[in-house]
Amino acid sequence: MDKMRIDKGDWLVVCDGRKALILENLGDEMFPNLHTKEVHEQPNPSTSAQGSDAPGRVHAAAGGARSSVEQTDWHDEAERAFLRSLAGRLNAAVSSGETTALTMVASPRALGMIRADYSDLVRKALQGEVGKDLVKLPVYEIEKQLLLSGAAK
């Protein structure tokens, strides 16, 4: 497995559907030194805590049959909105020159959600993606897991 490469000034974005850490490498590619640049968090209670109505009902056009309609997953919608806003922040950072390269580290589910919201600029700046959920770890542990242990790009 090759060691992940992150140059000085590059960003490492570690996120899931509720929290995002934007880390900047203040060291160099040989001796990375990740520092927290921004932390974005969103409280996201469970769907049952967000929606209290019973599922809707649909009446058939002919006959007396009824069926229920699936309840909206508010928890999932909040995660999508959070990741959409994070993608917007990354686009603003790349277009303004705050960073020229970034690497995404997120759970496979969050990666799948945020990919649809990448702008062309973010796609060009993207150095790689890692499908791991590391957002709850301290920064030194993220550094150890990804950069020092040799996570593949």
Image (tube, helix red, strand yellow):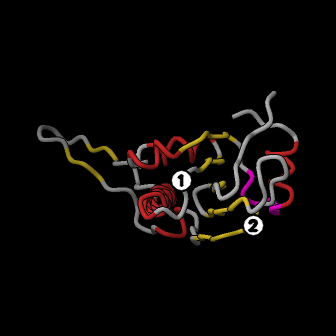
Tell me the SS state at disc 2.
Answer: strand
Q: Earlier in the sequence, mark 2 or mark 1?
A: 2
Q: Does 8 appear above or below 50?
A: above
Magenta residues span: 134-139
User: Per the image, is 18 magenta?
Assistant: no
Could you tell me which residue is drawn at 71 percent across and 68 percent down?
36
Front-lying residue, 81 or 99: 99
Q: Position of residue 24 (x, y in %)?
A: 68, 62
Front-lying residue, 132 or 118: 118
Q: Is residue 70 left or right of residue 27?
A: left
Quadrant for the N terminus, please: top right
The dominant secondary structure in magenta is loop
Question: For the residues marked 2 and 1, what is the alpha-carbon distance in whole angstroms?
Answer: 17 Å
Residue that numbered label 2 is attached to: 35
Q: Nearer the viewer, mark 2 or mark 1?
A: 1
Tell me the SS state at disc 1.
Answer: loop
| Amino acid on which the number 1 mark rests in the picture | Thr
Q: Position of residue 120 (x, y in %)?
A: 38, 45
Q: Position of residue 18 (x, y in %)?
A: 60, 63
Quadrant for the C terminus, please: top right
Residue that numbered label 1 is attached to: 100
Could you tell me which residue is drawn at 87 percent across and 50 percent down?
144
